[in-house]
Amino acid sequence: MTIPRHEYRLELDAMPQAPLPLAAAAVRIPSTEDADALAELMLDAYRGTIDYDDETLEDARSEVARYLAGSPMLECSSVWVADDDRLASALLVSLWPSRSCPIVSYVMTAADQKKRGLASLLLVRLLATLAANGHGEVRAVITEGNAPSETLFARAGFRRV
């Protein structure tokens, strides 16, 4: 059975704030060199959730490779690095070519780091960065029943299309 996914949209023109600065020790822009760490984070973050379908680490590596080979907007994306230097959370954005606008491609937080507000911080930073760079809107696609993502995006002002 396929679980439906819904598109969400947020207009950015009403967001005057400047991008939040990157915290030197915790948040940074991801790079292609993070591919393996992103795959490990993806598997850990999605395991046991509505979006998990018995994927393996190899499946996650393939998914990250597809993201990086597409239209990633790494300069607007960000990762939260834990004290032990592993990725604790990531928010990856792409250019959605058919809509000519940014789309949040992945929001991932390690299982042991959830409910700390890391994804919220990364999303706020993304929205400010996109607005400062002149983007008028951003989209996301969320699996129906993914309550953490539905709540995260609703709190940020996204509305289902």
Image (tube, rainbow, N blue to C red):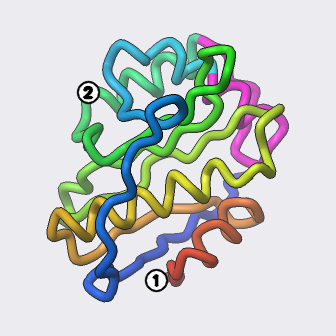
Mark 2 / mark 1, whichever is N-terminal? 2
Q: Is residue 99 above or below residue 88?
A: below
The residue lying at 50 percent from left, 58 percent from top is: 123
Name the spot of residue 83 as percent of width and height, x first.
67, 21
The residue lying at 69 percent from left, 66 percent from top is: 144
Left or right of 104 in this view: 16: left
Front in this rendered view, residue 112 or 108:
112
Residue 153 figure quarter: bottom right
Name the spot of residue 28 as percent of width and height, x first.
41, 34
Left or right of 6 in this view: 99: left
Which residue lies under the disc numbered 2?
A: 69
User: What kind of residue is marked 1?
Assistant: Val
The residue lying at 52 percent from left, 82 percent from top is: 157
Name the spot of residue 52 as percent of width and height, x first.
73, 37
Left or right of 69 in this view: 4: right
Count of labels shown?
Answer: 2
Name the spot of residue 3 as percent of width and height, x first.
69, 58
User: What kind of residue is marked 2?
Assistant: Ala
Circle 2 packing at 10 Å, graded few (<14), some (14-19), many (20+), is: few
Front in this rendered view, residue 14 or 161:
14
The residue lying at 35 percent from left, 13 percent from top is: 33
Residue 96 figure quarter: bottom left
Q: Which mark is residue 161?
A: 1
Tell me how far mark 2 sits from mark 1, CA to CA: 27 Å
Segment colored magenta: 41-57
